[in-house]
Image: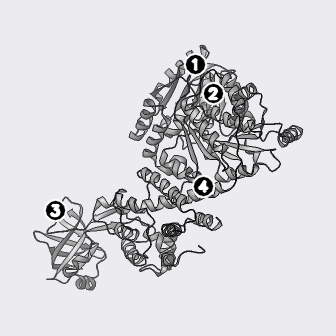
Amino acid sequence: MSGRPEPLWPLFADLKGLDGIGPKTAQTLAGAGVEAPRDLLYTLPYSVTDRRARDTVQGADLPATLTVEVLIGRHWPPRTRGGAYRIEVDDAKVRFQLVFFRGNSEYQQKLFPTGQRRLVSGRVELFDGVPQMVHPDHVLPVDEADSLPSFEPVYHLTGNVTQKLMVRAIADGLTRVPDLEEWIDAAQMKKEGWPGWAEALARVHAPDGPEDMSPTAPARARLAYDELMAHQLTLALARAARRKRRGIETKGDGRLQARVLAALPYQPTGAQTRAIGEILADMAHPERMNRLLQGDVGAGKTLVALMALLNAVEAGGQGVMMAPTEILARQHLDSLRPLAESAGVVLEILTGRDKGAERAAKLAALAQGDIQILVGTHAVFQADVVFADLRLAIVDEQHRFGVRQRLELGKKGAGADVLVMTATPIPRSLALSQYGDMDVSILDEKPPGRTPVKTALLSTEKMAEVVDHLRKAVAEGRQAYWVCPLVEESESSDLIAAEARFQRLRAALGEGVVGLVHGQMPPAEKDAAMARFVSGETSVLVATTVIEVGVNVPNASIMVIERAEIFGIAQLHQLRGRVGRGTAASTCLLMYQPPLSETGMKRLTTLRETEDGFRIAEVDLEMRGAGDLIGTAQSGLPKFRVADLERQAALMEVAQSDARRLLADDPTLESPRGQAARSLLWLMRQDEAIRLIEVG
């Protein structure tokens, strides 16, 4: 498999060889990510122009793009310099004008000889009651009328590249498409009624009408599937390569877990029990675990994590749990320590704050195996951190940790199992594209004792009432978060700054009642302000979104979110999850600035109607699009040219099971279909996958 297969060479040759593309155009296209004929062929039209011929422009709903056969009449050269050049023409019913603003008499006479018939196609508008076609897009002798497609593809353009140039270059590119063996499962092709690859490419550039633009049109669906399949094959190869690396068989005897369960005031939910079972089964296998634990806000991921860590300790090993921030690491420590103590297990924390002798002592205890469970921030990646026998690494809030850090962590324990936890419910299609190399456990039940949160929408005009409501709640000993959208009060921004809100609330509620946390604060100040709120010293915490992930203050039962309409729905759901953690009835007030847009309204009403994070994530995906949802820049989401993750979620699932099945039957892709799949990987530029096969 050394190097790209020969039949694909023409598709990866220089763009400059294509009809109409010179060095300058090639440079412009390269700027838009089109570097080879293959990229041009995967630049699909986004709409069509109806070029079907009709007898007359009369009765058409103008302005419109029309195609008619005309008899050419008189030419009217411009009377003044820079005036319009006009040509009278007759269709089957009416006389109208062709208009040119850069009219050269000699050229126009040649193109439109009086008394002859031509097919003209272009935009027709009414001007002083007379129809005019300004600068027709197409002019053809009648005997060449068949060369104009009934539906002309329309492409997104970059720089000075025209539609005509795109059409010419793509037509030339299509002549280079090789005949490749089929990589899609024959039964799948038949069931979906999909064309072969080469036919699909030709078809998407020669649409038969607007319906061919739909993601479900057979040719488009097939090309989308190719992209998803290549992506899933890459993930499946990565998964297979990882599984080959030996893990450690970690089988605990359950004694420590039993102690913790006995100390709990409630029974684990069915979902928690199921997830724990899946994780312990993975840990007992000789292959390394790579599992994603997805749980909505408050679904009880911490207990599941602790059981997995105790399983490692029971088997004589160590576990580590990583959080993205110091605040969260300390919170994990606070929630895990009492449970760990009930099991008699030594739990410690390591963050960037540990210095000198204290740090040295912790590192020594870790290296000797005296610390059984370590909680920490990315400080645990540092070179001098050595474990005696690391069996399990748990990473919290995955999207803050790149794949690279997952690997770093893996190096700390040669065969350590990895469990990634996220509280961001991700729609299945996205989970498959981002974490397709992982096995997934989902917590979809809320543990007992969580009170539902009542969500209400209020206009910012009711601010005074909200402050009154807060005054009463604080007098009753309740605590509240007040989330503001931005920190700096900039001229351009009409968003109320956290600083200003803090001053106003302090004036209204009294000194010492209100605290402030925002992103620009030094970490020590932030932690101190959080600590005062956690201990109940302050009753109201004004904050920017730094509190969204994982903060746990059971007494806080009110969440006010100002300018809620400018937050994403998933983020609002995360913020709301900070209340409803204690026994008090909790409220979340979404304050918006009227007038609300239709999408803003839909986001906020969806939140009011449901607390199901997965449902909310689906709505978010429909409304925002995939890249936006996870912030494409840092999401590691693949860039698809054809596939549309929102509309083709179901295809992603099929592609995943198909890719895994193909590799299970043919791990080295040597069979005829396996060889075809290799061509697909080269075609889709999945170099990563190709390396994996070669190394494998």
Q: Which dot marks residue 30? A: none
Q: Is residue 144 left or right of residue 607?
A: left
The residue that disc 4 covers is 239
**Sequence-earlier tag: 2 or 3:** 3
Along the line of sight, which residue is nearer the eye, 568 or 185? 185
Residue in the image at 16% along x and 70% along y: 96
Position of residue 119 measured from the top left corner of the image (x, y, whole percent): 20, 76
Three-letter amino acid code at the position of disc 3: Gly
Residue type at tag 4 = Arg
Establish if 473 lies above or below 199: above
Where is residue 549? Give x, y as percent: 61, 36
Could you tell me residue 334's position as x and y percent?
A: 71, 29
| Vertical comparison of 223 with 568: above or below | below
For residue 129, the mark is 3
Q: Nearer the viewer, mark 1 or mark 2?
A: 1
| Nearer to us: label 4 or label 3 | 4
**Label 2 neighbour load within 10 Å: few <14, some 14-19, many 20+:** many
Residue that appears at 13% across and 72% down: 91
For mark 1, what is the residue?
A: 583
Mark 1 or 2, nearer chain start: 2
Q: CA distance from mark 1 to mark 4?
A: 43 Å
Label 2: which residue?
A: 541
Q: Is residue 198 visible?
A: yes
